[in-house]
Amino acid sequence: MTSTLNCHVEHIVPKSKHITFIFEPKNLCVVCAECNTIKKEQETLDIIEDTLTLSKGKTRKRYPTVSNAFKIVHPHFDRYQDHIIRLGDYYYVDRTKKGSFTIGACRLNRLLYEFGWQETFHSDNELIELMTNYLETDDSLERIRILRKLTTIGLESSQE
């Protein structure tokens, strides 16, 4: 990820295709800038609900209020883990058709294609904890143990 701290407010249903939903609160969510750029204007609606009849015969489309109205995992109507499994910090596996669409639309596995598959998963938190412990300890034997663990992790990654 090139901009994990730079979050955007994303229109789940693209505003360029459905301008009537531009200010709909349920159509907004926080997303990383990279995913927002990748998703762009991809259609995410699967169906559009019935319309409300307004005065003078005009109609206005209502924002869907159910999960099955969307092709994408919707943060307000879906539980992410019901549709997508996250392996380690960077690999995503679909559990449903909606999960598959979301992984593809946002190219969630883009790092897999850039850096390859890693058989053994080490979370960022695990590595941060090891490095923090290394920096905070004065015990030279503990530092050697931590360095060996980090070296083993590095060798596992380079051999895959």
Image: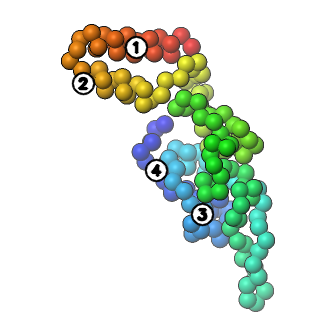
Residue 142: name its quadrant.
top left
Tell me which amino acid carries mark 3: Lys
Front in this rendered view, residue 136 or 36: 136
| Labels 1 and 2 touching (C-beta < 8 A) | no
| Labels 3 and 4 touching (C-beta < 8 A) | no
What residue would you read off at disc 1? 149
Sequence-wise first label, 3 or 2: 3
Sequence-wise first label, 3 or 4: 4
Disc marking residue 7: 4
Q: Residue at x 42, y 26 (%)?
A: 126
What residue would you read off at disc 3? 26
* Residue 97, horizontal then vertical, whole percent: 75, 43
Q: Residue at x 46, y 38 (%)?
A: 2
For marks 3 and 4, give the CA distance. Answer: 18 Å
Tell me which amino acid carries mark 1: Lys
For marks 4 and 2, give the CA distance. Answer: 32 Å
Specify the quadrant that holds the C terminus: top right
Tell me which amino acid carries mark 4: Cys
* Residue 116, horizontal then vertical, whole percent: 58, 22
Disc marking residue 136: 2
Mark 3 residue element: helix
Residue 85: name its quadrant.
top right
Disc marking residue 47: none
Tell me which amino acid carries mark 2: Glu
Q: Residue at x 76, y 64 (%)?
A: 48
